[in-house]
Image (cartoon, grey):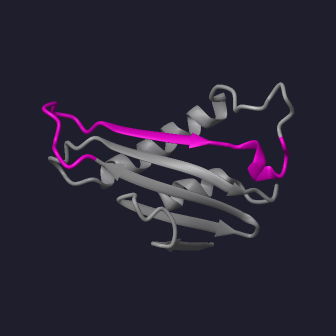
């Protein structure tokens, strides 16, 4: 597994690309500069599986990506539960973590790469 950072998404607060075999996932994180008034950490994790990452070009019916699948929701929750304890106490900034699949080879699981890059 190879994890590199700082090459892509220079406008994000942090980014990492995890690669294993021919599967690669880019994870970016952004947060606001002012804390929220709530006493919990607002964290949004969005994991999407794009059809083009697997080399499939969507037809006219599937031209735009449809709603999130159950697998995408469960993977997003798994990433959220694993990275939430890593933030320091008192960190109340709106934070968003986006996981984009760049390429999928069908052998290596992109979910595992997204969790490790997050």
**Residue at x 70%, y 32% (from the top left corner):** 65
The image quarter containing residue 114 is bottom right
The majority secondary structure of the magenta stretch comes to: loop
Asked if residue 9 is among those painted magenta in the image, a careful observer would answer no
Q: Which residues are magenta?
A: 32-57
**30 or 22, which is in the foreground?**
30
Name above or below for residue 58 compared with residue 12: above
Residue 60 in picture, x, y percent from top left: 84, 29
**Residue at x 51%, y 40% (from the top left corner):** 46
Asked if residue 56 is among those painted magenta in the image, a careful observer would answer yes
The image quarter containing residue 94 is top left
Residue 18 in picture, x, y percent from top left: 59, 66
The image quarter containing residue 103 is bottom right
Name above or below for residue 86 compared with residue 5: above
**Residue at x 61%, y 58% (from the top left corner):** 25
**78 or 15, which is in the foreground?**
15
């Amino acid at each position: 597994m190879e994890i590199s950072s700082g090459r892509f998404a220079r406008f994000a607060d942090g980014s990492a690309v995890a690669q294993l075999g021919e599967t690669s996932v880019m994870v970016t994180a952004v947060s606001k500069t002012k804390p929220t008034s709530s006493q919990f950490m607002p964290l949004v994790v969005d994991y999407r599986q794009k059809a083009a990452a697997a080399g499939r070009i969507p037809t006219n019916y599937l031209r735009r990506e449809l709603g999130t699948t159950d697998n995408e929701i469960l993977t997003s929750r798994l990433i959220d539960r694993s990275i939430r304890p890593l933030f320091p106490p008192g960190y109340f900034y709106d934070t968003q973590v986006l996981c984009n699949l760049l390429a999928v080879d069908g052998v290596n699981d992109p979910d595992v790469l997204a969790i490790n890059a997050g």
